[in-house]
Image (tube, helix red, strand yellow):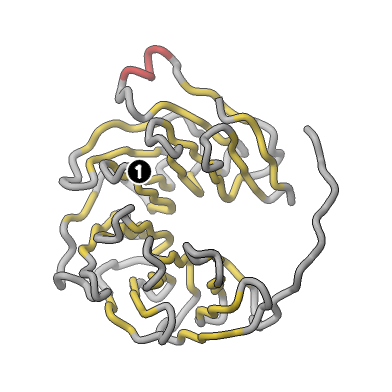
């Protein structure tokens, strides 16, 4: 593994008073949103670190946040069991959804910004329609996916918008139709729960990161067929559980990070 010289630190953002759990860059690259144990979401300038917005809608730890594809809104979920959608510039709240009965661990916007998927400790993934003005289009979800039999800890929307992958404490990653919730197939090769899932840019493969200290890359386009062909591989570079995984925009490499205090970049195929 090649370790390059470290880059220069531009600045350190010190606006948080407790540990930070989630961070996301705005689509235009000008701002960063971060949140964690102190229940607030802070939005700040990506070049200077200057704070521009403090969102106080949550009453408990914020698990995850994500910018809408057009950068107008931020969606955040947390231990208060809610999904909240709000204006990324003013902080005005447009949607407050409290339909999950357990902690909400993860969320994913659809590529066109019309829907949000939320994954929860209650064992479900809920799909919500989001109007162009940021409001929830209805007070009930479009549908609820109930394929997992334990907590759902990760969710990701395919770049082509057709399918969703979700992972959980049942040690599986499940792929299903984004429009109907119809089950496609289940990946069962991990030996511990799933912390993160990520689609390749071409929507053909999924990388899944687990507490079993592995990242597995497998073809999502072939359905069940890959079980007989063993058409996947396991990356075992980490020595402790893997927390997150991200694909490079050109689809050639994967970055993974974990409790072994490393970020590792490796060839995807």
Looking at the image, residue 186 lies above or below residue 51: above
Image quarter (top left, top right, bottom left or bottom right) of the C terminus: top right
- Left or right for 178, reference 213: left
Q: Relative to the observer, which residue lies in front, 68 or 121?
A: 68
Foreground residue among 255 and 6 = 6
Left or right, residue 264 beside residue 58: right
- Residue 80 lies left or right of residue 160; in this view the side is right
Relative height, residue 210 to residue 87 (above, below): above
Residue matched to label 1 = 158
Could you tell me which quadrant the N terminus lies in? Answer: top right
Q: Name the residue rendered at 39%, 39% in the picture.
A: 173
Quadrant position of residue 83: bottom left
Residue at (62, 29) in percent of width and height: 267
Q: Residue at x 56, y 76 (%)?
A: 37
Q: Is residue 151 or residue 111 the one in the foreground?
A: 111
Q: What residue appears at the point 15 percent right and 73 percent down from the top-left corner? A: 139
Q: Eyeballing the image, is 176 above or below 205? A: below
> Splitting the image into 4 quarters, where does residue 253 fall?
top right
Which quarter of the figure has residue 91? bottom left
Residue 166's x, y, as percent?
A: 36, 46
Q: Where does residue 250 sit, x and y in percent of width and height?
A: 53, 37
Q: Residue furthest toward the top?
A: 229
**Residue 87 image position (x, y, % from top left):** 37, 80
């Amino acid at each position: 593994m090649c370790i390059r010289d470290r880059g220069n630190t531009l600045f350190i953002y010190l606006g948080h008073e407790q540990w930070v759990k989630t961070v996301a860059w705005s689509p235009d690259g000008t701002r960063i949103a971060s949140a964690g144990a102190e229940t607030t979401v802070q939005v700040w300038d990506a070049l200077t670190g200057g704070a521009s917005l403090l969102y106080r809608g949550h009453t408990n730890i914020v698990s995850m946040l994500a910018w809408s594809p057009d950068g107008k809104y931020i969606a955040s979920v947390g231990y208060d069991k809610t999904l909240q959608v709000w204006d990324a510039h003013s902080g005005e709240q447009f949607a407050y959804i409290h339909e999950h009965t357990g902690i909400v661990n993860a969320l994913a916007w659809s590529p066109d910004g019309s829907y949000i998927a939320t994954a929860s400790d209650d064992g479900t993934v809920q799909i919500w329609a989001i109007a162009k003005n940021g409001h929830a289009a209805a007070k009930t979800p479009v549908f609820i996916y109930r394929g997992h039999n334990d907590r759902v800890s990760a969710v990701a929307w395919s770049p082509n918008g057709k399918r969703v992958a979700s992972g959980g404490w049942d040690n599986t990653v499940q792929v299903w139709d984004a429009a109907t919730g119809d089950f496609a197939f289940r990946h069962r090769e991990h030996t511990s729960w799933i912390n993160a899932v990520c689609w390749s840019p071409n929507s053909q493969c999924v990388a899944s990161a687990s507490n079993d200290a592995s990242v597995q890359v497998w073809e999502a386009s072939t359905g069940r067929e890959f079980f007989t062909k063993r058409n996947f591989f396991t990356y075992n570079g980490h020595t402790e559980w893997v927390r997150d995984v991200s694909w490079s925009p050109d689809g050639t490499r994967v970055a993974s990070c974990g409790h072994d205090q490393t970020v590792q970049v490796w060839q995807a195929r």
